[in-house]
Amino acid sequence: MARKLRKCLNRRTLFLIGVGVLVCFLSLVLVQAMFFPKHDLYVLMYHHVVEDGEECNDMTVTISRLKKDLYWMKAHGYQTVLPRELAAGEPLPERAVMITFDDGYLSNYELLYPALQAEQMKAVISVITCMPDRDDKHYIDWEMCREMTESGLVEIGSHTYALHNLDTKGLVISDGVNGIQRAPNES
């Protein structure tokens, strides 16, 4: 009889220990979820914005389409984040999105920036850094970069020093080679 009682207590003890371990594990998971939530970060990449009715290609978006995208994100609870916020260790919002624009086209200042201001959303613009020094009317200048950065809505990043189609002022060549600028002797 004593043997059966010990065996029963051992099973009950093992069961209670198992339940205790499970409760501790679930508590840790709950604490981690409450204080260290893991959220996805969606990254949307754009380049150039054009007025409605202007010609578009794979690298452009019309201003009305961009405004619809921003409105939809905001209406569905998405919050924009910047690289500097991630680097500072700020926690991601539940619905995080990083909006990026490559190259630093003038349209980023003339069309994108007012749209960001209207929705109070943020974006990072990665500038081909040789272009503001060239005083090229197709690209933003350093004063525009400062103004947008000071607003808190825009972070300026580097998209290399000199990368894309500089012989065509960075414009896409229809049915041609686009992307990395090649020297005259390169294919």
Image (cartoon, grey):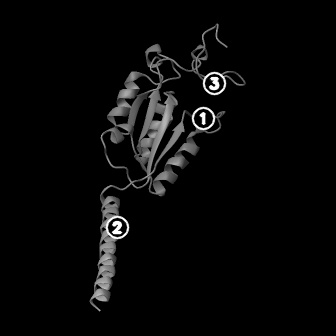
> Looking at the picture, does residue 15 appear above or below residue 127?
below
What is the CA distance from the residue labelled 2 to the residue labelled 1? 48 Å
Residue appearing at x 53%, y 20% in the figure: 163
State which mark lies toward you, 2 or 1.
Answer: 2
Residue appearing at x 57%, y 16% in the figure: 166
Q: Nearer the viewer, residue 98 or 1?
A: 1
Q: Quadrant of the C terminus?
A: top right
Q: Are marks 3 and 2 in contact (CB under 8 Å)?
A: no
Q: Nearer the viewer, residue 170 or 21?
A: 21
Q: Quadrant of the N terminus?
A: bottom left
Q: Position of residue 27 (x, y in %)?
A: 31, 67
> What residue does disc 1 label?
60
Q: Position of residue 100 (x, y in %)?
A: 48, 37
What is the CA distance from the residue labelled 3 to the residue labelled 2? 55 Å
Q: Position of residue 75 (x, y in %)?
A: 47, 57
Crowd rating for badge 2 (residues with CA inside 10 Å; few <14, some 14–19, many 20+): few
Q: Is residue 130 visible?
A: yes
- Which amino acid is tagged 2? Leu
Crowd rating for badge 3 (residues with CA inside 10 Å; few <14, some 14–19, many 20+): some
> What residue does disc 3 label?
172
Crowd rating for badge 1 (residues with CA inside 10 Å; few <14, some 14–19, many 20+): some
Q: Are marks 2 and 1 in contact (CB under 8 Å)?
A: no
- Which amino acid is tagged 3? Val
> What residue does disc 2 label?
26
User: What secondary structure is marked by label 2?
Assistant: helix
> Looking at the picture, does residue 87 appear above or below residue 68?
above
- Which amino acid is tagged 1? Thr
Q: Is residue 115 visible?
A: no
Q: Position of residue 119 (x, y in %)?
A: 43, 48
User: What secondary structure is marked by label 3?
Assistant: loop
User: What secondary structure is marked by label 1?
Assistant: strand
Mark 2 or mark 1, earlier in chain: 2
